[in-house]
Image (cartoon, rainbow, N blue to C red):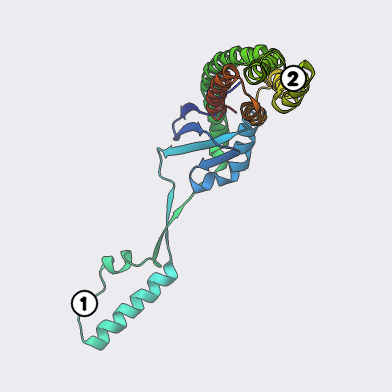
Amino acid sequence: MKSMTGYGNSEYQNELFRVSVEIKSYNNRYLDIQVNSPSYLSVFEQEIKNLIKAQVTRGRIDVNIHIKQFESNLDIIVDKQVVSKLLTAYKTIAEIAGLDENPALSHFLGNEDAIKLVKNIDAEIYHQAVIEQIQSAMEPFCQTREHDGQMTFEDIIRNLHKFEQSFAIVCEQADSLEAKLHDNLTERFQQLLGDGYDEGRILQEVGVMLNKYTVNEEIQRIRSHLNQFKGVMEKEAAAGKKLDFICQELNREINTTASKSVIAEINQAVVLMKDSLENIREQLRNIE
């Protein structure tokens, strides 16, 4: 079982550049990978996402990639044709205006068409370094997810144990439902009729009430869902969605049990079951 929250980072440096990678994840219903990097690294984005998808199935994943270049990658290009035309234009203006001066160097440096700054970046020189640092950062990232997932697993087990303790009370009390209904009806008939009541009539009423208040079917379904829940926890790594669905089914059966029960002990146990189940569902929101 893995948590959806994790963190990992890695860094590499050579004489030309430094690559820093940071991977963070948060709870999310689906897998959502966001790669934040310089635009020239966008050609590697799908490859980066595929590396993460191979190890992660759910969560919001933020991948932050920073490049620090130690040598300038700017090329300065002078457009000779534009400079020549500017020079002619400045001389013409000076002649028309009757000015005896030549254009200054600043007149040309300030013109964006005359001098252009072009970034000369070959993304391929960063490819191996970026991919290797992604892989390195994934190691601590996955370790933190597994560590947090183990803690969540243990907490779910504790709450599951509490749930089963309360469920055992429901099962025990449900087995005595017929006897309790018989005793309650017998007591009422005696209060109304004394000893002249009809035992057959009591048994008939007990049968009607059993059909209305018995929770045996709900107990069987809860037991089945519990077994399924344990099986998924033991066998499946990315089980968050499936476990949450099973919890929904358990909650439905618990609510039905509460609505049908006429035994105080069952009602009290159901409250404890709902509390444990809610704690479990809260933890499931954090796992993959």
Report the residue marked by disc 2: 202
Report if the CB atoms under discs 1 and 2 are less than 8 Å apart.
no
Please indicate whether residue 263 sits to the left or right of residue 78 in the image: right
The amino acid beneath tag 1 is: Glu
Q: Residue at x 44, y 31 (%)?
A: 15
Please indicate whether residue 274 sits to the left or right of residue 38 in the image: right
Which percent across, then down, holds residue 260?
65, 28
Residue 283 visible in the current orientation: yes
Nearest the camera: 127 or 120? 127
Report the residue marked by disc 1: 101
Secondary structure beneath disc 1?
Answer: loop
Which percent across, then down, holds residue 67?
45, 38
Quadrant location of the C terminus? Answer: top right
Q: Earlier in the sequence, mark 1 or mark 2?
A: 1
- Quarter of the figure with residue 188: top right
Quadrant location of the N terminus? Answer: top right
The amino acid beneath tag 2 is: Ile
User: Eyeballing the image, is 19 above or below 194?
Assistant: below
Nearest the camera: 202 or 145? 202
User: Eyeballing the image, is 90 above or below 235?
Assistant: below
Residue 122 visible in the current orientation: no
Which percent across, then down, holds residue 29?
59, 37
User: Which disc number belongs to residue 220?
Assistant: none
Nearest the camera: 142 or 234? 234
Q: Residue at x 52, y 47 (%)?
A: 40
